[in-house]
Image: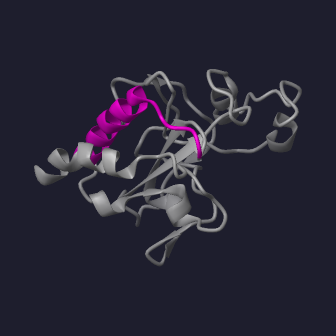
Amino acid sequence: MVLFEKATFIPSPHYDARPESESIDLLVIHNISLPPSQFGTSGIRDLFTGKLDPDGHPFYKEIAGLRVSAHCVIYRTGEIEQFVPFEHRAWHAGVSCFQGRHRCNDYSIGIELEGTDSLPYTDAQYDALKQVCEFIIKRYPRITLGRIVGHNDIAPGRKTDPGHAFDWARFRTGLKHVLGAR
């Protein structure tokens, strides 16, 4: 199992094997908060592990029974939880396409940031994201700067995350030394 050593591993039942013909060459950044715009709850963990209580919040009734996951979630504190080993297919992208290739879950890694499209992400999240991305890039060298995208890039019109609050320039600048070292 390929796990990020600084993450707490909490296995999700929502994953499967990648097609043998696919190699991992895309990293997708998302955002999530459960309930919407609330942080520090167990909602994300509960959703990704199939334990979300539909009576826990009115919004949960709308998403109860969803079978979704991401490889990792980075909380506002910088804490990282990994739900799916990187070599497996997490169910994060949904209907998606990148550069003419459909079914992005088949060949991508999904990282969720606890947040919303419009609220700034924390310094701790950018630091943690840089660390996990460095780990991923070293193991999956086909992921280049141009192959690190937002959910909005692979599902335009359907998804907007990580949103306009995500500082792409800050994020990419932090990764240049790793990508340049190859």
Residue at (44%, 59%) from the top-left corner? 107
Magenta residues, as a range? Answer: 118-139
What is the count of numbered marks? 0
Taking the image as shown, residue 163 lies to the left or right of residue 125, namely: right
Kindly report the secondary structure that dominates the magenta region of the rendered protein.
Answer: helix
- How far from the left and from the top, in percent, is residue 113? 51, 38
Quarter of the figure that contains the N terminus? top left
Q: Is residue 123 above or below residue 151?
A: above
Taking the image as shown, residue 99 lies to the left or right of residue 155, namely: left
**Residue 182 in sight from this viewpoint:** no
Residue at (58%, 50%) from the top-left corner? 92
Residue at (71%, 33%) from the top-left corner? 50
Taking the image as shown, residue 12 lies to the left or right of residue 63, namely: left
Identify which residue, 54 or 75, lies in the foreground. 75
- How far from the left and from the top, in percent, is residue 49? 65, 31
The picture quadrant where one finds residue 69 is top right
Residue furthest bottom in the image: 100
Q: Is residue 59 above or below residue 179?
A: above
Q: Is residue 58 magenta?
A: no
Q: How is the image coloured?
A: one colour
Residue furthest left in the image: 181
- How far from the left and from the top, in percent, is residue 122? 45, 30
Residue at (36%, 30%) from the top-left corner? 128
Q: In this view, does 147 lie above or below 55?
A: below
